Image (cartoon, rainbow, N blue to C red):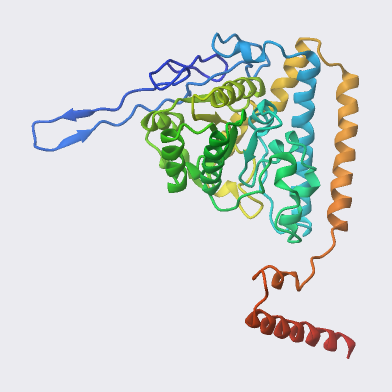
Amino acid sequence: MSVDSSAAGSPRRSAAGKAGTTGSKTGTKRTTSRTTTRSTPKKSTDPELVQLLTPEGKRVKNAEYDAYVAGITPDDLRGLYRDMVLTRRFDAEATALQRQGELGLWASLLGQEAAQIGSGRATREDDYVFPTYREHGVAWCRGVDPTNLLGMFRGVNHGGWDPNSNNFHLYTIVIGSQTLHATGYAMGIAKDGADSAVIAYFGDGASSQGDVAESFTFSAVYNAPVVFFCQNNQWAISEPTEKQTRVPLYQRAQGYGFPGVRVDGNDVLACLAVTKWALERARSGEGPTLVEAYTYRMGAHTTSDDPSRYRGDEERLAWEAKDPILRLRRYLEASNHADEGFFAELEAESEALGRRVREVVRAMPDPDNFAIFENVYADGHALVDEERAQFAAYQASFADVEGA
């Protein structure tokens, strides 16, 4: 069954688990010759997905997942909206700072706020999160000061927070490797008997990496309490998803023996509900789950990318109509859960956040030029000492020129 983005989709059951979903079957077609020809999978323009809130802001029922948001209050809804607005404001400020030369690079989350805030708010304090380099909204949910995310992109540190303080791992630049880290960590806490779960974030492009396939294998065999949260934003830099897979990404989980489900990644309520279900399943000893959040990267892959070279404006405009923030605002207004005073106050808070981000980034101290030599060997090394002396002489040569 395929539904468009304005209707609810309910996951089908499978032997792999409660919310395993199935799509169109791909088989082989016999011919009169000795060769067999693989039939081309039917390509659906409208994904099969779990949705609780339509782009028009209308609440739709879902028998499988309504229970996971049944207790949500108007305050909770306003909180989700605030999270998305402030995360987007921070992201926009970081993009502007890079354009002004204050950051070396930035990976924007524009358009993916619902996937990150919904899933992030589904985690418990004792759960552990393994992000990529774009999970600014998840970091916000885990209590990481957003300004701490910028040090690495400014080149002043390798990660500005203690991962164990928030159970939020440092950003991972190597594509897909964090899924292995998450799987190993999940296997460890399972052996410790901990009542917690792990969630690993990655993109559609990373799903083609061998590390992700290996993490699926290990997590399934060892029944690890891990949720694989794939933000399918349609583009792995300039490569569309259809050039990476012949089936929807969530269906890959079936081959490893655990359930996969596709959720509307622009629907914060659906992302919250599905991730809650998957995390509870992990904590109860039922093993891994693959969640594919079907969303869209409205901006560039990073600030070094020009998306106009590989995709058209009409595609972007179509997805802007499904904007996750606008969707929830429509629901809040239609349900009388928020008034103009709330939105005005949030706008002022958003501007204040932008100012604070600018001030903090520009005040970040430069790193000690010689700190790089301190952590190569635990007990020091003669060659490192020699290199440190050479670097000191090199630095001093510039000082001499400036003083001349």
Image quadrant of residue 377?
bottom right
Residue 142, above or below 54: below
Percent of width and height locating residue 31: 12, 30
| Residue at left offset 67%, top offset 75% | 380
Image quadrant of residue 123?
top right
Camera sees residue 234? no
Q: Nearer the viewer, residue 194 or 51?
A: 194
Camera sees residue 278? yes
Percent of width and height locating residue 253: 42, 31
Q: Nearer the viewer, residue 194 or 123?
A: 194
Residue 151 lies left or right of residue 120; in this view the side is right
Residue 381 lies left or right of residue 237; in this view the side is right
Quarter of the image with the C terminus in it = bottom right
| Residue at left offset 71%, top offset 70% | 372
Q: Nearer the viewer, residue 370 or 292?
A: 370
Residue 36 lies left or right of residue 309; in this view the side is left
Image quadrant of residue 127?
top right
Residue 229, above or below 333: below
Quarter of the image with the N terminus in it = top left
| Number of numbered tags placed on the structure image | 0
Percent of width and height locating residue 401: 83, 88
Q: Residue furthest front?
A: 192
| Residue at left offset 68%, top offset 41% | 168
Q: Nearer the viewer, residue 222 or 18?
A: 222
Residue 127, above or below 181: above
Percent of width and height locating residue 362: 86, 57
Q: Residue furthest bottom?
A: 404
